[in-house]
Amino acid sequence: MDPSTITTPPATSFDPQSLRADFPILLQKAASGEPLAYLDNAASTQRPRQVIDAISDCYQRYYANVHRGIHTLSESSTDRYEQARRSVSVFLNAASSDEVLFAAGTTAAINTVARTWGDQNVGRGDVILLTMMEHHANIVPWHQLAERVGCEVVFAPLNDNGQVDQQQLDALWQQHGSRIKLFAFTAVSNVLGTINPVQQWVRQAQQHGARTLVDAAQTAPHMAIDVQAWQPDFLVFSGHKLCGPTGIGVLYGRRELLESMPPFLGGGAMIQSVTTEGFAPAELPDKFEAGTPPITEAIGLGAAIDYLTDIGLERIHRHEVNLTQHAHALLADVPGVRLIGPQDPADKSGIVSFAIEGVHAHDIAQWMDTRGIAVRAGHHCAMPLHKSLGLSSSTRASFYLYNTMDEVERFVEAVREVRAKFAPQGRRRRRRS
Amino acid sequence: MDPSTITTPPATSFDPQSLRADFPILLQKAASGEPLAYLDNAASTQRPRQVIDAISDCYQRYYANVHRGIHTLSESSTDRYEQARRSVSVFLNAASSDEVLFAAGTTAAINTVARTWGDQNVGRGDVILLTMMEHHANIVPWHQLAERVGCEVVFAPLNDNGQVDQQQLDALWQQHGSRIKLFAFTAVSNVLGTINPVQQWVRQAQQHGARTLVDAAQTAPHMAIDVQAWQPDFLVFSGHKLCGPTGIGVLYGRRELLESMPPFLGGGAMIQSVTTEGFAPAELPDKFEAGTPPITEAIGLGAAIDYLTDIGLERIHRHEVNLTQHAHALLADVPGVRLIGPQDPADKSGIVSFAIEGVHAHDIAQWMDTRGIAVRAGHHCAMPLHKSLGLSSSTRASFYLYNTMDEVERFVEAVREVRAKFAPQGRRRRRRS
Amino acid sequence: MPSEQDIYEEHVLDHYEDPYHRGQCDTATHAEEGNNPLCGDEIRVELRLDGEGKIKEAWFDGKGCVISQASASMLMERIEGMTPEELKEFSATEMLELFGPQLTPNRQKCCLLSWRVVQRALHSPLDEDDDSATFGGPSLGEES
Amino acid sequence: MPSEQDIYEEHVLDHYEDPYHRGQCDTATHAEEGNNPLCGDEIRVELRLDGEGKIKEAWFDGKGCVISQASASMLMERIEGMTPEELKEFSATEMLELFGPQLTPNRQKCCLLSWRVVQRALHSPLDEDDDSATFGGPSLGEES
Ligand SMILES: Cc1ncc(COP(=O)(O)O)c(C=O)c1O
Ligand SMILES: Cc1ncc(COP(=O)(O)O)c(C=O)c1O
Ligand code: FES
Ligand code: FES
């Protein structure tokens, strides 16, 4: 199922207020004394106590290093670690949990693909196709690959609505044809909120014999993923963006590809045998998990996924679209605000990025902080995108399951204040003493 | 200071029993109903509540993504994250905290050096010098480098006392001379417990113009490290082996080298700018920390280091030597037990590895588990070492600050039982029905 | 948690110390090797199938822990007289039951080592390519 | 925690909206550029030193947040008349004091941007190599 074709969720009411009780950090006041409105979820989300407890519980009751241990603690840890892998596997609807590899994060996962599959399969004159809305994590590893092997990195341009122009994309496929070895694209833009047609793009790549990598960092937290339906070759996401711990992410890969790729990091666990002459790699998934893995992080990620699937990703997404709709509607009344990305909330995830003529994004964010509202300012690790928009930075509010309509209203009110305070009035100030 | 020349600690008494109260997991009974004797510390250690609380506290009170955030939570997280870097820097006595890079673990750190410094500086015909007691984490990345660039990997052999034979090591320097580009060695063996003369070996490498990488995974938890005195080019260790979280380790590198090396993983935070044409890397330490870093893990690591330095590493080491001494003395009376590694506990860290003639290591570990004693069996990620010892596996008890003389005695008692139960008696059993 | 103290019950130790058909089968028609990737232990199984394909003799050799050795002995004793179909139907669960004491997942791999090798041995007639010369035999990790 | 509401006090906004010597100095003898790696904002400073090396004129240009622009304006006003030695002694702490409102570490970088560029400008006479053409000017991250 494409993320753009979400089915209507059951009509049960969604109550963010009651969910907030699960998140200890949201119960405290902001430094300003006001209730904390955390709208920086695209950068990283907060954790429910279910996840924090899962981590503590591991350390307090059954922690040991995993895999080869015989003793009870090690068996328990291994068991829970592998259970987390199965949770992720179900979450992605993977054919086998062997296709689910734990990595340090989205960034580490993409670099793994670039340095293994990339070094093995991409050469001089080949093309890596990206979109202009990619996060640096899905740009820099390909620039580095280009430095190593001499391939070319091509960016599909966007239209005025913050979407890839399908005609121009078709033209790129036409132009480069089978030279395109990989189409690596984000399923949802971390700046524009744009939801891309994953399944359609994967099919298009398949028709040209190209591989696909789907950056699901902004998708996994908000929408159901089905790798068997989407059929990407690789799909990656991070734990910390879906209520999970830092220090962990997931690299999904199709078995056939993972088996044909050389291993990446070398060390313990990823080997079948080591001699003074060389080594033989282990089977999946160990082959790509060198050294002591992020054990409690994987267990915490499993708990986060259980938490989110209990609530239901469709319901979460629907709630976020409602918040975005409200934000768009209110911001339409504030002059001087330039909303970037799709103008119709139905085409978007719960991300609202904007610029205010004559006001620096960092001043906007700083002012919001004085109102207890956490938003992010800057290029959001998407400098090429900002350049293409003619901006050096933007301010971004990004929503999650625990955000409320009231927070959206406080946010828009703060936007109004910012304009009043900072937008150039054209007046001369009195001379300073 | 060399790890082998530990000064006598102050005569204050060291009371592991009172420290145990800090470790929730040690307060519970083992599955067998007996008190848990956790002697698998070389694989991974347990955590005091100070560390568990530091992690929970971050998630509950001040978590956000680090670095570029303006809002209060992000400032707080960044502050604590960088504070952890400074704690590590002091812990290692680094000249600057810019030389301290957070990595996913020892394995990730060594691979980082191999793929950046290695790919840049090592070529066909060059030699990477290792010792025969290295962990796979310090072997496989060099085998992989050899596959990429055509260098040779040479192993310094050990004597019967489980130490590198200095004369044979001298001969290797003589033989390969300036072809040796790097001497990568462990400061303490994770199987033999052998403490290597780090400072002396670094000087020797310097005289030959070679770089050094010190694997301090088994050293950092137990002995004071001084990178300005030792002068290694690189030094690495893992958080989970010194009471810290999983998912984090440290790569120390000399500034001059780190600055001249290309970056490794590409993505957010490690860049100064990105365009559609290429990228410019950031300054240290960001250059080597792509993507969202292990934030709570770094903060937990800082708490672990504070905890250990409060107690004092010299005192911890002295305590472990006492335990080892006791274990050696008692095991000397058990026939058929082959202790591997230095016979004198003064040459060792708190690691006791052994084999029992005719008994499989996994049966030993399994039996110990029935007695509530957690030890590890296998090749301990050191297959070349075991091969050189004529063994396919060994059983390892490894001590830490919270272990007691009583636990050592229970351990030796279990060794006796194992011998009685499993060692071949040469008798014929009755025929089975 | 299985009560691990029971793993090494008398019946298991009997098979360990005085195994059934440990050694070589001079008239073997089929043979196969395999290892346990967790520990590197290897086992070789040699079978003699008669004209109708029935298992007339089953022998094993190798090294490993008590569980792997005792379970191999039990298995050799058990499968003699079986048809290939019967052997194929003899499931992992039945193997674990045959062994007796409850095992944790890691130790189940020990117990199932010879069982896996036996299943493959049926497809490895001795006149054809014998891949026993490959690195430590094929790893069976992917199937576990 | 600094009370952030105070950052944008009137005095700061005065300098932001009506800055001192924003623009170019046609008779500049020294100039330097630099950027804040955290946000990419750039600032250029141009100085005119007289025969004895005293700063006769100080001008800045660039873009950035209120803090960086207001602090640059304050700094230009402050350093005119200073000798190079006096400027060298004018510390980061003094710069933060000159600005006024307390700042978090990230925002201190905004406030210190022009201060750093000024310190380097003294060593960048205009007839010699002007590296203003390099990628966004030298990054000052390593010094912060
Ligand atoms: C000496 C040594 N080096 C490297 C490692 C690998 O550390 P990690 O698994 O944390 O990456 C270990 C631990 O297993 C070790 O003992
Ligand atoms: C779309 C996208 N891709 C990749 C990343 C990088 O994720 P991480 O920093 O967890 O590696 C992010 C998050 O910043 C993102 O939003
Ligand atoms: S430990 Fe190797 S087969 Fe059991
Ligand atoms: S945000 Fe760029 S200088 Fe302040």
Image (cartoon, coloured by chain):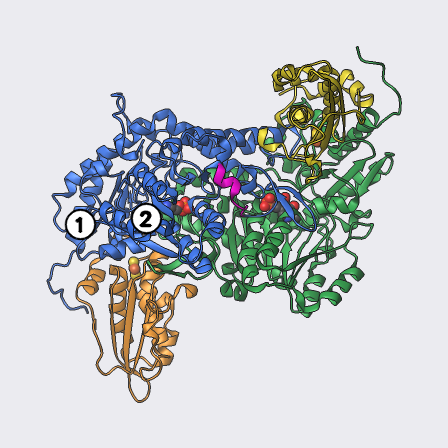
Chain colours: A green, B blue, C orange, D yellow
Q: Residue furthest right?
A: A427
Residue A344 rendering spot, x and y as whole percentages: 82, 48
Q: Is residue B125 left or right of residue A162?
A: left
- Residue under pointer 2: A71
Which subunit holds the residue at mark 1? Answer: B
Q: Position of residue A80 (x, y in %)?
A: 45, 49
Is residue C107 one of those drawn in magenta?
no
Q: Quadrant of residue A433?
A: top right
Q: Give the magenta part as a residue range.
A: B256-264
Q: Which quadrant is home to the C terminus of chain B?
A: bottom left
Horizontal placement of B147 versus C46: left or right? right
**What residue appears at the point 31 percent right and 82 percent down from the top-left corner?**
C126
Q: Position of residue B146 (x, y in %)?
A: 42, 57
Q: Nearer the viewer, residue B307 or B416?
A: B307
Q: Depth check: C124 or A223 in front?
A: C124
Q: Which label was assigned to residue B338?
A: 1
Identify residue type, mark 1: Arg
Report whether residue A308 is seen.
yes
Q: Between residues A56 and C39, which one lies in front from this camera angle?
A: C39
Q: Is mark 1 within 8 Å of ligand 3?
A: no
Find numbered disc 2 in the image and state the secondary structure of the residue it sits on.
loop
User: Would residue B49 be visible to someone looking at this image?
Assistant: no
Task: Tell which of A214 and B383 is nearer to you.
Answer: B383
Q: Residue furthest top?
A: A433
